[in-house]
C-alpha cells in the first residue's frame, strides 16, 4: 500500500477520510484500503484549497471507470475548506494486490 501520512487535523487527512467512503461496488473494501489512491496534494491559497488526487483502477476495463473518479471528486468537494477537486486516473504503476492494506487483504481473505 502506498502510505500517505498526513497530520490528523490536516486538510489532506480530511480528504483521505472522505475518500475512504468510496467503494468499488464489487469489492466490499474502500478504495483507499484497496490501494487505488496514489497521491493527495492540497494547494492552499488564502481561503481557497485545490485538491489533486492521483488514483488508479483495478484494471482499464473496470466497470466503474466512468463513475468512480467523479464520485471521488464529489466526496472531496464536500470536505469543508475544499474549493476545487480534480481526480486524475493513472495507470503507472499498475495496481496489484500488493498495494492493498493488510486490513483489506484480511477482509477479502487474501494472505
Image (spheres, rainbow, N blue to C red):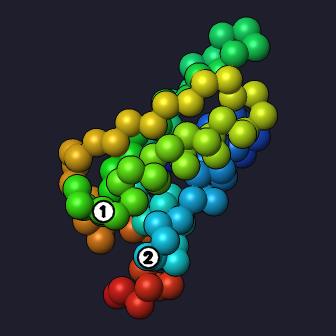
Q: Which percent across, then down, holds residue 99?
A: 34, 63
Q: Which percent across, then down, holds residue 5?
A: 55, 46
**Quarter occupied by residue 54:** top left
Q: Secondary structure at mark 1?
A: loop
Residue at coordinates 69% horizontally, 43% vertically from top-left?
A: 14
Q: Which mark is residue 62?
A: 1
Residue 80 in the figure: left or right of residue 97: right
Q: Residue furthest bottom?
A: 109
Q: Which mark is residue 16?
A: none
Residue at coordinates 50% horizontally, 44% vertically from top-left?
A: 70
* Picture layout, residue 104 above or below residue 66: below
Q: Which residue is mark 2?
A: 26
Q: Residue furthest top?
A: 46
Q: Secondary structure at mark 2?
A: loop
* Picture layout, residue 25 above or below residue 65: below
Q: Which percent across, then down, holds residue 86?
A: 49, 31
Amino acid at each position: 500500500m502506498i502510505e500517505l501520512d498526513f497530520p490528523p487535523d490536516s486538510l489532506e487527512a480530511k480528504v483521505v477520510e472522505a475518500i475512504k467512503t468510496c467503494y468499488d461496488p464489487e469489492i466490499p473494501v474502500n478504495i483507499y484500503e484497496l490501494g487505488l489512491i496514489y497521491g493527495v496534494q492540497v494547494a492552499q491559497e488564502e481561503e481557497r484549497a485545490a485538491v489533486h488526487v492521483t488514483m488508479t483502477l483495478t484494471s482499464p476495463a473496470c466497470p466503474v471507470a466512468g463513475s468512480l473518479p467523479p464520485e471521488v471528486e464529489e466526496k472531496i468537494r464536500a470536505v469543508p475548506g475544499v474549493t476545487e477537486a480534480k481526480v486524475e486516473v493513472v495507470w503507472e504503476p499498475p495496481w496489484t494486490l500488493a498495494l492493498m492494506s493488510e486490513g483489506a487483504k484480511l477482509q477479502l481473505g487474501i494472505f
